[in-house]
Amino acid sequence: MSSSCQVSNEESPLVTYSLDDAEQVSTALIEAFSIGSVDIHGKENTLYDQINVDAIDGFDWNTDRHLRLSFPVWDHYAVITPESIEIYATS
């Protein structure tokens, strides 16, 4: 089953969460959704059901290379960079 969502280039993120060097990205992602008042606890699927959390946490986010990971999750769109996590509404 494939998932599809669209985010307009003109759309502002619902949440921009600054990453702490010591924080796991998966933990920060959940925190970003919580800050955005998205009820993730009432969702049928967990974060682990939707993405490979170990892979995201395993990336070297403290690299000098430009990293950008984006994916749909919980009816939203997440964009992760070494500096921040942005959560967008989908259309």
Image (cartoon, rainbow, N blue to C red):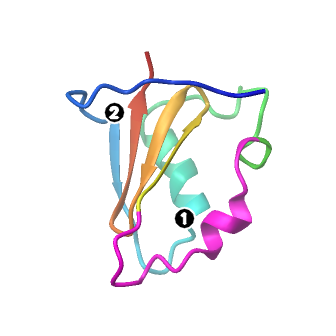
The answer to whether residue 61 is left or right of residue 49 is: left
Residue drawn 47% across the image and 31% down it: 37
Residue drawn 46% across the image and 76% down it: 61
- Residue 87 horizontal/vertical position (percent): 41, 39
The disc label shown at residue 77, or none: none
| As drawn, 48 above or below 33 | below
| Circle 1 crowding by C-alpha within 10 Å: few under 14, some 14–19, many from 20 | many
- Residue 82 horizontal/vertical position (percent): 38, 69
| As drawn, 56 above or below 21 | above
Q: Quadrant of residue 8?
A: top left
Work out which residue is located at the far top of the displayed protein and give it: 91
| Magenta highlight: main SS | loop
Q: Secondary structure at mark 1?
A: helix
Amino acid tagged 2: Leu
Residue where numbered disc 2 is placed: 14
- Nearer the observer, 90 or 66: 66
| Circle 2 crowding by C-alpha within 10 Å: few under 14, some 14–19, many from 20 | some
Mark closest to the chain's N terminus, 1 or 2: 2
Amino acid tagged 1: Val
Label count reads 2
Q: Quadrant of residue 88?
A: top left
Q: Quadrant of residue 3?
A: top right
| As drawn, 47 above or below 25 | above
The disc label shown at residue 25, or none: 1
For the residues labelled 1 and 2, say whether their Cβ atoms are less than 8 Å apart: no
What are the residue bounds of the magenta stretch?
A: 50-67
Task: Specify whether residue 53 is painted magenta.
Answer: yes
Q: Secondary structure at mark 2?
A: loop
| Disc 1 to disc 2, C-alpha distance | 18 Å
- Nearer the observer, 69 or 23: 69
- Residue 78 horizontal/vertical position (percent): 47, 43
Task: Specify whether residue 61 is painted magenta.
Answer: yes
